[in-house]
Every structure is written in structure tokens, then in C-alpha cells.
Image: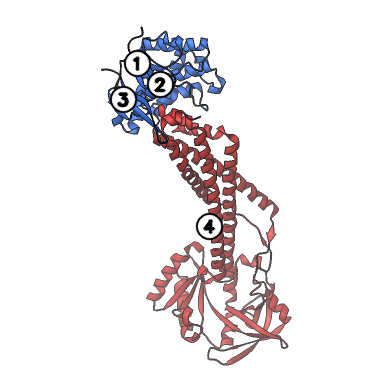
Amino acid sequence: MMKWTKLAIRNILRNKRRSFVTLLAIGVGFAAISLFYGYVHNMYDGLRFSAIRGEGLGNLTINKAGWQEKGKLEPEKYMFSKAETEKTIKLVTEENGVVLATPQIQVTGIVSNGITSTIFIAQGVVPRDDRTIKGAWAVFRPIKGEGLNEKKPYGVEVTQDLARYLNLASGKDGVVMTTTLSGQMNAMDMQVMGVYDSGSDATNDKYMRFTFDFAQSLLDTKMAERIVVLLDNWQKTEEVRALLLTKLTHAGIACEIKTWNELSLFYSKVRGMFDMMFLFLFSIVLVIVVMSTVNTMGMAVLERTREIGTLRALGLKRRGVSLLFAMEGGLLGLFGSFIGVVLHISVWAIIRALSPTYTPPGVSTPVPLVVDLVPQALFVLILCLIFLSLFAAIIPARRAAKQNVVDALGHV
Amino acid sequence: MALIEMQNIKKDYFLGETVVHALQGIDLQIDKGEFVAIWGPSGSGKTTLLNLIGAIDEPSTGNLAVAGKEVRSLSDNQRSELRNETIGFIFQGFNLIPVLSALENVMLPLQIKGASLGEAKAKALSRLQEVGLSEFIRHRPAKMSGGQQQRVAIARALVNDPSLVIADEPTANLDSETARMIIGLMRELNEKEATTFIFSTHDQRLLDRVKRLVRLEDGRIVDGGMKP
């Protein structure tokens, strides 16, 4: 095997310029895919972090069975009673890997500063639990002001554009109005305890956060819309969902459990778009690699026709000729991938050194451009390109092997 | 038993709609240890005949047996094995692999056969020594003269200890002195190891030293007897 590998390497080096161009094409293609993958990998990580921590979705959201379909129409029928809420939280927190389970409720209505009014969408959360869910996320989106706390149940947090629109700085008072679950109008005084950036232009002028008790009072209920579960490891999400669904069903709590990625529409859409872009880019690179390798190997077969005839005359079988050329193709893929790895690491290091930022559409603040170095992905990509080049070389290799020995020897 | 047995061999080529009768009923028998020259004018069928004997081509009709094996009944792989184990080739243009050194070129048939690196190296070194190229084992073909390249080709042809060596115009690209040396070397190996040599040539120096001449004209043997 070694002797044929050596021969294949020397054949690649025979026409250095042509091989270099092919290797460069494979290397640049490799780097394009791996850098894009590294960028997307980092973005998916960030989006996951943002969905679980930033959006406060936790890892799992437990609703009463039927909520997703009919909950908005008949909320009281599809919300957890106080007893059910307590029982569910107790059963959930018993499980390994569960950091917390906390009740939440959503309120929509009108917020006013006494002069101007606008609509709002608020989440009623338990402040202490919300701080646990936010965790490290709080560093990225700091709250201007004291923030929600149990000592001031009528204190609220307001998104920055909404605060600006209503001139509601931290410490100022206002009024929130909504309809209770029974359909009555209800209004309550509130005090702004903090102003925050939701991270999205679309929600920065309407999102608010209430304490859970304040939201319940406003809706005139003791029920909870959902129970949000935070896990110590996001990779356990599916496993814990299945476990909790069985456990709660057996305990007589008819529920439905959604994962963070099912609920984060933004994550799903962004992921779908970038997966499609990745596929598109990969297809382009695939065509470039295949065409470059086919061209290089096709030229090599043509130039070495007489040599192929000699090898066949010496007793090398057709399969041996095919393997020799296929090996050359595979080695082109391997060496091209090495160039790609070097390019990837170089660009990765430059990005780390310069720390550039950009503002994606719909996002309110600049985000750092980060490209991850994912060794497993690089390894898989190396294998992919080796097999791709090998596959591309098979066509000219088979042509080489099928040549008539006499014709090949007489080739000029 | 004869090493080569040809009975009524015909070979036709098709150039568009034109049929070229390259060989028209060849009957030939060559025994082990013979030193045979195939000669005749250009287009007489010398190379075609050698290609058939070398099992790199097959006759249109007729029976051809090499070392007791009927060539037409062999698969492509079996023919490759026959060439590798029984036949050595020496080409007019040397046909060395340019990216391999002299030693690696000579090792090639053994490595195709599947011999170990050590065995292949030892046998190749021994053959290179026999052809007087011990000093040039690391040289690539481009760094060697025509005569040296042809000696490497001879070493390569002999490295598998074949029963038969086929040489197509082996001295055509060489100067007189080198040609004489190559002829002497082939003759010496023929006598020492009883290896059968069959070659095509126009070279009178070579014709003067053969044991048997086979003269071809228009695809037919017109004189196949011993050298007068």
C-alpha cells in the first residue's frame, strides 16, 4: 500500500502548478464550508442560549393538555390550578438534572403613563426564579434599574423603546389595563423597576415583565398558564421531556410539554434559513471540488496514457490502475483539506484578534462576529472531501483502466 | 513443450470501414532459451506479432499458447498475471516511470506481484548490478542516458525471472556503442539464464548475433528458419 501511496504522491507533485491550483480550489472550498459552519455553530449556540435564558423559555414548558390549541379561547379551562401547579412543580423538581420549575403567566393589554397609552405583552414571572433562568444572560442584557423583586409586587420591567415612548424611566409610575380571565376590565397601578433591551426591534416597544403575583392579580386568578423547567444541561431536553410526560401523566396531570426550540420561532426560522444557506454553499463547493478533481485527473490520465500502458504490460490489473488514480484523487482531497484547515485556523485567529462586530437585521445591538473551531466538524469535512475527491477521480480512473494496452503504449 | 505456439494466427484492424490484415495466418513455435529476431519492413506486422506473444493484444482468429496457456481463453486479470510472472518487456522508448528511481522502476514488477519490500529491493539491486548500474540506483530516468535507461528497462524485464523477454526495437533509440553493449547484455543473459528473448529489429548489428531469424512480409512469415 505504501509503495502505491508514494507513487501517487509523486504523481501529484509531477505537475506542481496544476496540482497546486486544484489543492487551492479544494482548500478554499474547505475553508468556506468550515468557516461558515464555525460561524453558524457559534450562532446556533448563541441563539439557544438566547432562547433558553434570554427569552426565558427555559428548556421545557409544561402546559395543561389542550393549551396550545384552545388555551387562548378558554384560558381558565386550560390553565393549572394552584394545587396542580404546586403538585407539578414538586414532581418536576424531584428529577435529576432539573434546576428549577417555575410558574409563569402571560398578560396582554394596554399600558399608560396617564397621558399616552399603548399595547403591551408581559410575562408574569417569579423574580427569584427569573434571575436563575437568566443566569449569565443578564450580563449581555443588563437591566437599567433595580429590576423585579419580591419586595415590590407592583414593580414591573419595561423594554427600552416602550419606556422611551411612554417616558417611563425607572422609578416612574403608570397604569396597566387588561381583561380578567372572566372578561372584566381591570387596571392596576405599577411602578417601573427596570428598563431592558429585549434584543429585538420587533419586541422592544411592547414587552414587559411583571411579578407572577402582580400578573395573577391583574388577570384576577390564582392559576398558572405554564410551568417553565430549567435543566442543568440542554442536551438532556428530549430525555427529560419524555420522562416528565410519563411521570406527570401517571400522576393524573394531563399536560403537554414543549421544548425551547419548538417554542422559539426565531430560533427555528433562523436555523432553517442558515441550514439552507449551508446546503447551498456546500453544493457549490461540492461542484468545484468534483470539477477540479475530474479535470486534474482527466489531464493526468491523458498525459500518462503511455505510462498506464507500461504498468498494464508489466502486469498491473485494471483494478490496480483504477486504485492508483483514485488514490491520487483521494490524496488531492486530503492535502487540499489540510490547506483548508490552515486557512480556517488563520481566519479564526484573525477574527479572534480583531473581534469584529455586526448588527444583524431586527437585532437592536451589535453582536460580535465569532467563528467556532469545531475539531469534530473539521474531521468530518476532511473525510467528506477525501471521499468526494476520490469519487470524482473514479470517472477518469475507470477510463484509464479500461484503455487498451496496445493503444496506451502507442499513445504519443 | 514449446514456450510459444502459434497456429494460423490472424489479426485484423478496423480503420473506419477499412479492414487492415496485420497478420495473415502465422504459424510459429519458439522454444525455451531461444534468441529470436523478428524482422521485416515497416508495416510487415512485427510489433503486432510481439503484442500477441506478449499477451497485451489478442488475435482475431487462431490459437496462441504462451507457456502452455491459451491466451484467448484467459480473462484480463489472468493475462495480467501471465505478463507479470512469465513475460518481461523492453520497449523502444524505454518506458520507465519518470517519478521513480532506477531501483524503484526495477522493483515495480515484483511489487505488482505482491512481493515484500525487502525481497523486491534485494532482487532489483541484484539485477541492476548485473546490468552495471549499481551506482545509479537512486537516479531518476531523466538524469540517465538512453543506454542507462535501456539497461534499467532490461533489469526491470528480468527482475521477475521471466521465461520470456519481449523487446520491441530495443536499440532503435541508442547510439552504436550503446546498442552494441545492450545487444551483448541481452545475449549474455540469454545464454546465462536460458531466458527466451524475442525482439523486433532493423538493426543489422543485432541481426548478426541472433540464433534465429523470423522474417515477416505483409503479415506472413516468409522465412522462419534458423539464421543462415
Q: CA distance from mark 2 to mark 1?
A: 11 Å
Residue type pointed to by label 2 = Ser
Give the residue at mark 3: B9
Residue visible at 57% across and 41% down in the picture: A23
Q: CA distance from mark 1 to mark 4?
A: 71 Å
Q: Residue farthest to the left? A: B1
Residues at discs 3 and 1 both on one chain: yes
Q: Could you say whether the residue bearing mark 2 is in a helix, strand or loop?
A: loop
Q: Nearer the viewer, residue A117 or B195?
A: B195
**Up/down of A68 relative to A21, above or below:** below
Judging from the image, mark 2 belongs to the subunit labelled B
B110 displayed left or right of A389: left
Give the residue at mark 4: A279
Residue type pointed to by label 1 = Val
Give the residue at mark 2: B44
**Up/down of A299 relative to A40, above or below:** above
Q: Nearer the viewer, residue B52 or A145?
A: B52
B215 displayed left or right of A29: left
Q: CA distance from mark 3 to mark 1?
A: 15 Å
**Up/down of B178 relative to A73, above or below:** above
Q: Specify the label residue A47 is tagged with.
A: none
Judging from the image, mark 1 belongs to the subunit labelled B
Q: Nearer the viewer, residue B46 or B18?
A: B18
Give the residue at mark 1: B222
Residue B81 picture quarter: top left
Letter of the red chain: A
Residues at discs 2 and 1 both on one chain: yes
Q: Could you say whether the residue bearing mark 1 is in a helix, strand or loop?
A: strand
Residue depth check, mark 2 versus mark 3: number of the one nearer the observer: 2
Residue type pointed to by label 4 = Leu
Judging from the image, mark 4 belongs to the subunit labelled A
